[in-house]
Image: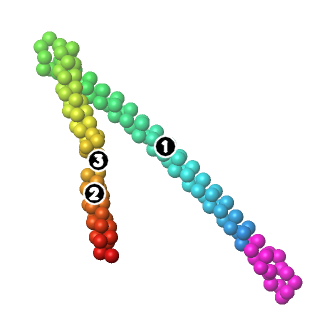
Amino acid sequence: MALDGRDGRRGIGTLVRDLADGGVKLVREEVRLARLEIAGIVDGIGKGTAFVATGAVLALLGGLSLFTGLVLLVGDQWLPEDLYWLGALIVLVITGALAVWFAKRGLALLSPAALAPDETATTLKEDKEWLKQRLTSGATSS
């Protein structure tokens, strides 16, 4: 805080310089805060992704164990002479049919027709017609 010689008051140049210095310091602190926040967000994304991936791998292993158990159950309990290969084939056919059904359903939901914003397109067409009508009626009324 520089003071000029008059009654201990600061001059306008000093005030402007202090304001500029304060502004620069404020911007630097805001940038530092933004960097810290972004680093925290990126860290959270990394940890969250790792947890989701670990959970997905464990779920996959659990599903494989379930299917193995189903094959053993079908081959041991429901088929004569421990025909495990036939049990595996039965489980494969059932899970394959489910996989095809899910894939078809997913592709139908992801088709361009399903993803098109129909209401927005309709509204834009209505707005275009309204604007065209307003422009033509405005041109003829003057």
Q: What element carries label 2?
A: helix
Where residue 129 sits: x, y (%)?
27, 61
Q: Distance between the residues labelled 3 and 2?
A: 15 Å
Q: Residue at x 20, y 18 (%)?
A: 89
Please tell me in which quadrant of the rendered image residue 26 appears: bottom right
Q: Which of marks 2 and 1 is nearer the N terminus?
A: 1
Residue 127 in sight from this viewpoint? no
**Which span of residues is magenta-colored?**
1-18
Q: Which residue lies furthest to the top in this view?
A: 81
**Mark 3: amino acid:** Ala
Location of residue 80 with respect to 32 vertically, above or below: above
Where residue 63 sits: x, y (%)?
29, 30
Residue highlighted by disc 2: 125
Q: Which residue is drawn at 22% across and 29% down?
A: 100
Residue highlighted by disc 1: 47
Q: Which residue is drawn at 28% across and 57% down?
A: 125
